[in-house]
Amino acid sequence: MLFCFYAVAIICLVIAQTVIMSSIPFFDSFYDILIPFIIYLGLFRSLRESLPVVLLCGFFIDGLSGGSFGLYSTTYIWLYICCKCVIRFFHAENRFILFFAVVLGVILQNVMFFGIFFILEPGGRQDIYIIHFFQSQVICAFITGPFLLAGFKQVFIILDKRLYSERS
């Protein structure tokens, strides 16, 4: 039941990002909306429950992106590993972590993407558009990241209550 919910959630998030948000002018340069989802899984869910979901997210987006296969999977896995390492030293409910986790995830993803881009295209253009795109994603992550994490947390609180009340 829980993995069915994860599959539906992944599909809904991907559709929201690729269909709905890409057609709205302000949201066309919005960051990857699966980043807060991966961060939530890394901070608040168990390894056994969340690792298959992270891998599924990565392979699903890699198949849709048309870019280098494995780029999203690698990014999501590293982001997930970083979150699991952070909660070894800090409490996952720490407001500082929740505020900056999505921003750091967006920065990590952009560094990996631009690094691969510049490796594959050594003479590629490095224009102001890339800097503007990166800045707009970081600003959007500062503004919306904590709210998305809180939203995911509330959805999973409701889901956990439903699942565990059905089992009793």
Image (cartoon, rainbow, N blue to C red):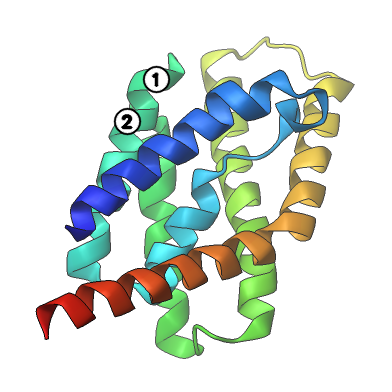
Q: Residue furthest left?
A: 167
Relative to 136, say whether 133 is above or below.
Answer: above
Where's residue 30, x and y in %? 70, 36
Disc number for residue 118? none
Marks 2 and 1: in contact by CB < 8 Å? yes
Residue hosting label 2: 60
The quadrant in which the N terminus is found is: bottom left
Q: Quadrant of residue 8?
A: top left
Dot 2 alpha-carbon crowd within 10 angstroms: few under 14, some 14 to 19, many 20 or more: some
Q: Quadrant of residue 111?
A: top right
- Comparing 133 with 124, the one in front is 133
Residue hosting label 1: 64
Per the image, label 1 sits on a secondary structure element best described as helix
Where's residue 60, x and y in %? 32, 30
Q: Is residue 84 visible?
A: no
Per the image, label 2 sits on a secondary structure element best described as helix
CA separation in Å, label 1 and label 2: 6 Å
Q: Is residue 68 left or right of residue 125?
A: left
Where's residue 77, x and y in %? 35, 51
Residue at horizontal 22 percent and vertical 72 percent from the top: 163
User: In the image, what residue type sits under mark 1?
Assistant: Leu
Residue at horizontal 62 percent and vertical 39 percent from the top: 110
Relative to 15, say whether 58 is above or below.
Answer: below
- Comparing 133 with 34, the one in front is 34
Relative to 139, say whether 43 is above or below.
Answer: below
